[in-house]
Image: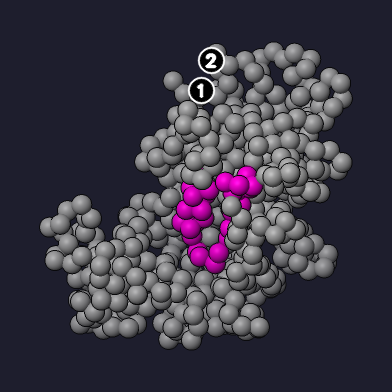
Amino acid sequence: THFRSAAKQAATGARSKLIRVVMHDLRSPLLTVYSIAESLSAADRCRAQGVSLSGISTMDEEYDVIVLGTGMKDTLLSGLMSVAGKKVLHMDRNGYYGGESASLSLDEMFKKYANGEKPPPELGSSRDYNIDLIPKFMMASGKLVKMLLHTKTTHYLEFKQIDGSFVVKKGEVHKVPATETEALKSGLMGLFEKRRFRNFLVYVQDYEEANPATHKGRDLKRITGAALFKDFGLQEETIDFVGHALALHTTDAYLREPALNLVKRCQLYSLSLAQYGKSPYIYPLYGLGELPQAFSRMSAVHGGVYMLNKPVDKIEYDANGRVCGVTSEGETAKCKMVIGDPSYFLADGKVKQVGQVIRMVCILSHPVPNTNNSDSCQIIIPQNQVGRSHDIYITCLGNSNCVAPAGKYVVIVSSTVETADPVKEVTPALRLLGKPDKIFALLNNIYEPINDPTKDGCFISTSFDATSHFETSVNDVLAIYEKIMATLPPEERKEIDLEKPWRGEDDS
């Protein structure tokens, strides 16, 4: 009812065309398309059901854009293109939203990752679980939050702050200090190191790129991250948690790069922490699968058509190799371009595998030890602490986040795969959790596009990486959107400024 009311408000004014609103029950994979126009012609009523008066399917039409997959990136791009005035058809082979970034019930997890076994009754009701396949948090001042505000989709969602942010040093869990006060209390550093770290934090917080007076004689575009740390005399273990738990770098490559990005990342952490106080992260109630649904509603309100449980048999190309349609169940929908996740382009040779991510989904009956009984938290194990080239991430969520029954916790351990035994690689993280009730092992391939979208009209996103937040994902979306806009005539281009709210065609 809430979403239908919001869509009615969007439809008021001069517009009288059919508005389609996606109404999706959180506990059901069913999709219903509702018409909310005050009065509909017979043709409009038929179109609301996906057919025309002559019985021809909605597939037998031409669209500006066909989007394949309902992951977070795909639905966000679908919404942006719909608001830009493009005719969009959105298809997904699955019967649920989210694709690779879906949130599944316990029954769905057992069906997909436990050979169809039935969940044991001691785990609680399946309907109380919303288990993320891609565990990530949102930086409170990050780009995804700005995108939600920009696209005005925040009213579709509710958020809760994550209780704490922790880092592992020599096998022990410590709270990540991000303020001067926390630095003085932290057990991560000795007395003299705390003073040096405090000086570093003051410099970072005061730094303004446009104000040379705050640079203190340092050109951060020229000196490396390693040189900046050396300038403040920070020890290796302090550098470890600053680079990986504050700046959230996944490897040590940043030490050889200009220090400006390091400082900006630390500032983002600090600004996000200042929003609410406990940690820099927020999380949507009922799981990350809510994000694709919110962006889908934005697209549907602006005329986007959605089809779940719709297999993609073939992507069609013309004689010049440019995409011209998508065939499903013997029907072909024509289009000018296709947007999609990499899994839809494997057979076309337009993507390549660049790695793998291991994700261990654990169900616990207790909070993660040594986290102050936090109902939700993140723990980062820097690469050097366990002799690896990539960090290990632990995300913990509980009943207060509406992802598990009371007394149960969903904890996900994830990292980039480096050897032939990925489970062994994340064993140091599993040891921190205590005894789990159930473990699911998920191994995901990472793909990236290798095609030229200006020639073939296929705009393909990269797979989700192992990072603990959505900053790289939003960067990918913005890069794809800019490439799409560059192919359009100047009068059809719609720029995005994340510092300003979106002005859609219905806005006054």
- Image spot of residue 245 (x, y percent): 40, 70
Q: Secondary structure at mark 1?
A: loop
Q: Quadrant of residue 198?
A: bottom left
Residue for point 51% across, 32% down: 489
**CB under 8 Å between callouts 1 and 2?**
yes
Residues drawn in magenta? 453-481
**Is 4 covered by the magenta stretch?**
no
**Is 466 covered by the magenta stretch?**
yes
Judge from the rendering whether residue 127 lies leftward or rightward of residue 213; answer left or right. right
Q: Which residue is mark 2?
A: 13
Q: Quadrant of residue 2?
A: top right
Distance from disc 1 to disc 2, alpha carbons, whole Å, reads: 8 Å
Judge from the rendering whether residue 28 lies leftward or rightward of residue 74; answer left or right. right
42 and 159: which one is in front? 42
Within 10 angstroms of label 1, few (less than 14), some, or many (20 or more) residues?
A: some
Within 10 angstroms of label 2, few (less than 14), some, or many (20 or more) residues?
A: few
- Image spot of residue 246 (x, y percent): 37, 67
Residue for point 53% across, 15% down: 13
Q: Which mark is residue 292?
A: none
Asked whether residue 264 appears in the rendered view, the answer is: yes
Vertical arrangement, residue 8 with respect to residue 363, above or below = above
- Image spot of residue 376 (x, y percent): 51, 62
Give, as a three-letter code, the residue at label 2. Gly
Q: In the image as oriented, which residue stretches furthest toward the front?
A: 320
Vertical arrangement, residue 51 with respect to residue 351, above or below = above
Q: How many marks?
A: 2
Q: Secondary structure at mark 2?
A: loop
Q: Quadrant of residue 464?
A: bottom right
Q: Which residue is mark 1?
A: 506
Q: Which callout, 1 or 2, points at the residue further toward the start of the chain?
A: 2
Give, as a three-letter code, the residue at label 1. Asp
Q: Quadrant of the C terminus?
A: top left
